[in-house]
Amino acid sequence: MFRSICIFIAAMIAAAAACAQTWPTKSVKIVVPNAPGSIPDLVARLAADRIAKTLGTSFVVENNTAGAGLVAAQTAARAAPDGYTLFVGTITSFAINPNLFNRSLTRFRLFGRKK
């Protein structure tokens, strides 16, 4: 029981330290590999609007349809891993294009996953 309490206290201290971080300190770019007005674009814009109001900073949605979405995926994958570039992907971006065009998107990571 004492060990569980110690683990819980350590987790709370770590969570408090994580909450103290200030993010975002600049504009966040959301890259969408679809045309403006498409469903992924609308989802990105609605989410950006809601998150911008909550966090009090600007979220910019960038549409890039070149190369069947590969250019947008590569732009997001090559961005600095600082959390200021987000990617709204679809099944085309993550499953079909890498297999169809023999391109690897291994630089993408799921939220919360460490290398």
Image (cartoon, rainbow, N blue to C red):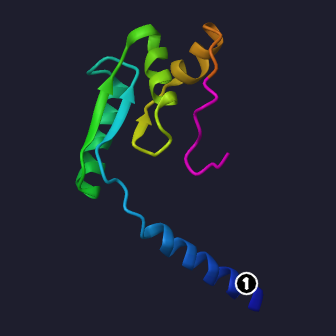
| Residue 72 x, y percent position in the rendering | 43, 21
User: Which amino acid type is marked by label 1?
Assistant: Ser
Q: Is residue 98 visible?
A: yes
114 vs 32, left or right, is right
Mark 1 neighbour density, 10 Å: few (under 14) some (14–19) many (20 or more): few
Magenta region: 105-115
Find residue 27 and report its image quarter: top left
Q: Is residue 75 above or below residue 24?
A: above
Find residue 103 and report its image quarter: top right
| Residue 81 x, y percent position in the rendering | 50, 41
Q: Is residue 1 visible?
A: no
93 vs 51, left or right, is right
Find out whether residue 112 is within the magenta segment. yes
Find out whether residue 67 is within the magenta segment. no
What predominant SS class does the magenta segment belong to?
A: loop
Task: Name the residue beneath numbered marker 1.
Answer: 4
| Residue 48 x, y percent position in the rendering | 29, 42
Q: Is residue 100 above or below residue 47?
A: above
Q: Which residue is painted at 45% across and 16% down in the image?
A: 71
Q: Which residue is painted at 50% across and 28% down in the image?
A: 78
Q: Which residue is painted at 27% across and 20% down in the image?
A: 36
Find residue 7 and report its image quarter: bottom right
Q: Is residue 74 above or below residue 21?
A: above
Q: Which of 2/73 is in front?
A: 73
